[in-house]
Image (cartoon, grey):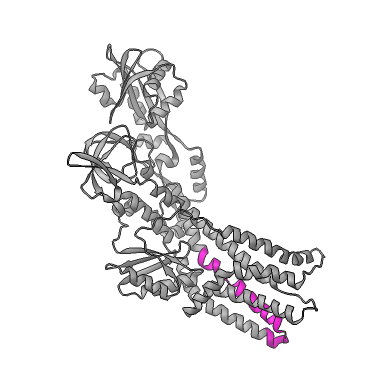
Amino acid sequence: MGRFKMAALHILGSIMATANANELTLPIEGMSCASCAGRVEKALRAVPGVRDANVNLAMERAFVTSDNALDTAQLVQAVERAGYKAVPVAAAAPAPAATSTEPLEIAVSAALTLPLLAPMLAELVGIYLMLPGWVQFALATPVQFWIGARFYRGAWKALLARTGNMDLLVALGTSAAYGLSMFQWLAQPRQGGHLYFEAAAVVITLVRLGKWLETRAKRQTTEAIRALQALRPATARMRAGGEVREVPVEALRVGDEVLVRPGERVPMDGVVIEGASHADESMLTGESMPVTKGPGSQLIGGSVNGDGMVVARATALGAESTLARIIRAVEDAQSAKAPIQRLVDRVSAVFVPVILAIALATFAGWSLYNGDWSAAVLNAVAVLVIACPCALGLATPTAIMAGTGVAARHGILIKDAQALELLHGVDVVAFDKTGTLTVGKPRLAAHIAADGSHDAMLALAAAIQQGSEHPLARAVGEAAGRVPLAATDVKAVPGHGVTATVDGAGYALGNRRLMERHGVGTGDLARAAQEHEAAGQTVSWLAQLTPEPKLVGLLAFGDAVKPESREAVARLHGLGIRTVMLTGDNEGAARHI
């Protein structure tokens, strides 16, 4: 169990402890490799009052913490002195993807590079071609100085900061290959010697393509956070002085009274002070069944109010709300550094100068070995190009972002990068029941008539609930199919059920409390109801109220096990991993699953 505890996924309980008033997120522009991230971290940690600073290269963000209030201007200046740009933001919400010209640039680069590469590929099948030098020059120059301009800008910034980065390696390597080709073409134009324009163009095209794919992957991994952000409404109906007015959510304060109408999203965390309803909290709990809400009940921001209107007093807003803490938990996991990534950061700090030294040694060695300085340049270029530390600095954080993003879309919140790294060593897996092992969607398991036709009773229940969005109503509709009856005067009874009129008779459909409210007993069906409830099923009762009160029947709803759950558990057992199930249901329901 020790390894399991280390790798546990810290969800709701630990989410509540993530808020920190002395944390700041800074988007960083201009980073291209792990060395860049290391320099930004070093610059931020040198600012007085900063307790710690972590830079995530894949997210292009710095996360700064301090015991006291942070001076944003000082942090921005420190980043700029290091050769990069920082933009302070109050919240780390990912912005929608902007329109980019990068795909067009990469397509143009590939179109210019392929003709340069074609003669080399043709040699593999015995065809020897050589493009004229001026053609190679015309094709390679736009790639080198237009498509590759970003590498020169990055290299210049690195030199100004007296440091090195991936851009410097690419700029040096491709410039050396391009410059050597220019010299050989101009110095010996008629000898037709081999030029190396294609080497520079291929490297720039492939590195630009790799960077674009990384950026695209990062955008996709932030979709989970965007989806969570979309759960937060922009406005709220605040009640004050006997009046209700619509205000921006940002204008709310703790203690304000907020009116939430049926079908609306709850704009903040609060406690119900008036009214009764149900709330769909599946966005947080995964439970498809709405939760009954009445005076004293807790409302969670982002949940959907059901069939009743309620007034709630705000208890948590903004960064203190449950939804905001869930979002921060996902962001923290994506920005966290696994132990192996910290090792990568230490290596990256000295990577660029070491590679430059190796390239110089390679050039010197080949020059002294055979005196062919053109071969020496090419081999030095090869060292610079092959050593570009893209994968070194981006593989681990991008993998963490992708993993946590996919997990969040499936309702799994991973808060600790170390836990994610140690996950391969777990020996116990704990499953939530509803929505994980089961479908999370109720289905009609049984319908029993007190007297008469079971199908007629089902049709009557479907007519009463026709048009309702309640999960149980949808389950009845799916089981009944086409409904020949029509209900009128349908009224929701929050927390209890619904009443309606069908063919001139009054009916009530809901829980046992609704039956007691109208003085209808459960009679001979009480035992059947107990059996279904013992199996973890929800029981609803149907009664006629007028002209004569009497029980019509019951409906039992259950949650089906997912088809793939059995296979998943069996595969875990095959790996020697023990499985346990966590549920708030009774023991009978748990054993039934």
Question: Please, is residue 288 above or below residue 531 in the view?
Answer: below
Give the position of the N terminus as an image quadrant.
bottom left
Whether residue 296 is visible here, answered yes or no, is: no
Hey, which quadrant is residue 91 in on the image? bottom left
Look at 26% across and 50% down and name the residue there: 251
Give the position of the C terminus as an image quadrant.
top left
Which x, y percent locates residue 238?
Answer: 24, 43
Whether residue 112 is visible here, answered yes or no, is: yes
Which x, y percent locates residue 306?
Answer: 33, 34
User: Magenta span: helix, strand or loop, mainly?
Assistant: helix
Which x, y percent locates residue 80?
Answer: 41, 73
Hey, which quadrant is residue 118 in on the image? bottom right
Question: Please, is residue 39 above or below residue 319 in the view?
Answer: below
Question: Please, is residue 288 above or below residue 14 in the view?
Answer: above
Q: Nearer the viewer, residue 261 or 10?
A: 261
Image side of residue 4 versus residue 128, left or right: left
The total of numbered circles placed on residues is 0
Span of residues in magenta: 366-394
Image side of residue 209 versus residue 518, left or right: right
Q: In the image as oriented, which residue stretches furthest toward the left?
A: 241
Which x, y percent locates residue 287?
Answer: 37, 39
Look at 40% across and 41% down and name the residue there: 433
Q: Nearer the viewer, residue 443 or 319?
A: 319
Look at 50% across and 59% down and name the residue there: 399
Q: Nearer the viewer, residue 5 or 26?
A: 26
**Residue 376 colored in magenta in the image:** yes
Look at 29% across and 44% down and name the residue there: 236
**Residue 350 colored in magenta in the image:** no
